[in-house]
Image (cartoon, rainbow, N blue to C red):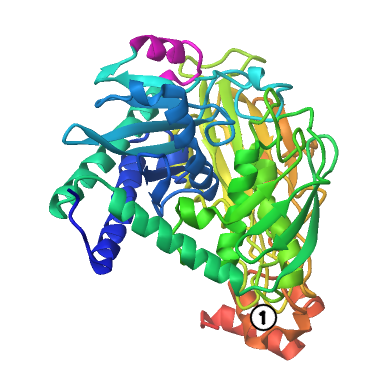
Amino acid sequence: MTKQHSNVSYQVMWNRMISVVEEQAQALVRTAFSTSVREAGDLSAGVYNVEGQMLAQAVTGTPGHVNAMADAVGHFIRRIGRENIFEGDVYITNDPWEGTGHLHDITVVTPSFFKGKLVGFFACTAHIVDIGGRGFGADAASVYEEGLYIPIMKFVERGEVDKTLISIVRGNVREPDQLVGDMYALATCNEIGHRRLIDMMEEFKLEDLSGIAEFILENSRRATIERIAALPRDTAEGEMTVDGFAKPITLKVKLTINEDNIVTDFTGSSGLDKKGINCPMVYTKAYACYALKCAIAPEIPNNAASLAPFITHAPENTIVNALHPAPVALRHIVGHFVPDTVYNALDKILPNVVPAEGAGCLCNFQVSLRPRTDAPAPEDATRSEVLTFNSGGSGARPEHDGLNATAFPSGVMTMPIEATEHAGPVIIWRKELRPDSGGAGKQRGGLGQYMEVGAMEGHEFDFQAMFDRVDHPAKGRNGGQNGSATTIAQDDGSPMNGKGKQFVPHGRKVVLAFPGGAGYGDPSDRDIELVKRDLARGYISVETAKKDYGLAENDINDVLDAIKKGEAI
């Protein structure tokens, strides 16, 4: 018999479970081989009950992974079969439609047994640097070109690693040691979570998780529905146009607030793209849920019950509900714009709540380096795949400025130069904030970044661009101005595309300017001391201080004098 516990003890256990999965995530950060995991935190971790319902997620991680992974464990249970779930098993997949949206995410699920009885599951996901195929980019015409597909299967059965799987993986990817190392790191972090869960169950004398699961799910469901019930019953529409690959794409949403749920319907969005920027429904749903949770119930922990009242619809084979075999490698390009599209609708129902548009999708790029081919290469020239995560500025909020070079909605970290250069013979010649890139407003948009990227002597490289906001910068809200657009070119002035694999010859650099977030509110209403502070910090130029904010000449001179004297403003 399971011992009956009070609500207080269940709350303590709930908090403990969140700490368990956070330790699980941190174990992955410490043991992962890929810089995308170690340095950017592009991962997720969670614990599930025996039915496959998510009970708790780690704070470390991305909403696209966590919210998509909330549905994944159910697929694993169905595919593996309950009769084939054994103690000592580890399961794996990178299926875009039953995992987290593209082949570059490895999801690992581990059943958790206590005293010989299945009590739940641990799951984790990480973005890996290479999965073979065309490499990480938008150039493929179908998912078959995008890399090695691993169906839901056993990585480990009763403690025995599937060596055939390992051989197949190693034979199909460019960075085999890195990928296999990440697979083991994913399995290990689940094991850490399992051990801590068993410690908790022994401490609280639990035989299973049914009691605490019911407590978590019922309280989360009730709290979320109470928040929704307090909102006005209303419907609104939102729309965005973004760059796309070869032509602009449109995202449309109809948002309906009901008594006990909120429905986002993406009917009217663009159809499938020929290139790999299409987004599976699982990823669209993840970011639609996340946007609404942030605005309506941010402090309610993520789990199956707190996500359930947020319902997402989209017609099949649209860019936000791509079906197999659509190319989906850069599904984040579209998925990261889903929150801003949802907010464009929600702002019409709940004004002064949501932020202005931001950079949206991550400013990632991958560099495929090799010995130069235009002349003899030095003997120490090597091949290498280097993926780096970077961010533009986030949109200004109703009461706060946007964050500089900070990813929203993905939440992953910008990689430090040292980690990027350690991964291969790449050189980051410049990386700094981009003044004047944040849209002017009562609250200013966050700044983007400048970067210049090259290779060590003796190397040439292919540059996989994954950028947006080149032709469609972030739009201001409530009178705020737009953020600055993305620019990309070689250092000799040769133009480059915002997306796709492009060759960069020996000795050339790629010069990048990442987009800024948009402003919120009329710039003339901005506190004059904040304008002076921005000027002193170099966030805005003298010209912007005059033109957009109307800063008087004597105030500008005061700031410039203070800068010369080294005084703080």
> For the point 48% across and 43% down, which residue is it?
70
Q: Quadrant of residue 346?
A: bottom right
In front here: 249 or 364? Answer: 249
Relative to 458, is 524 above or below? below
Residue 167 in magenta? yes
What is the span of residues highlighted in magenta in the rendered image? 163-176
> Is residue 289 in view?
yes
Relative to 325, is 481 above or below? below
Residue identified by numbered label 1:
531
Mark 1: amino acid: Val
In front here: 327 or 527? Answer: 327
Tell me residue 408's x, y (percent): 59, 56
Relative to 439, is 371 above or below? above
Disc 1 is placed on an element classified as helix
Q: Relative to residue 52, is residue 191 drawn left or right?
A: left
Tell me residue 540's x, y (percent): 68, 70
Main secondary structure found in the magenta portion = helix
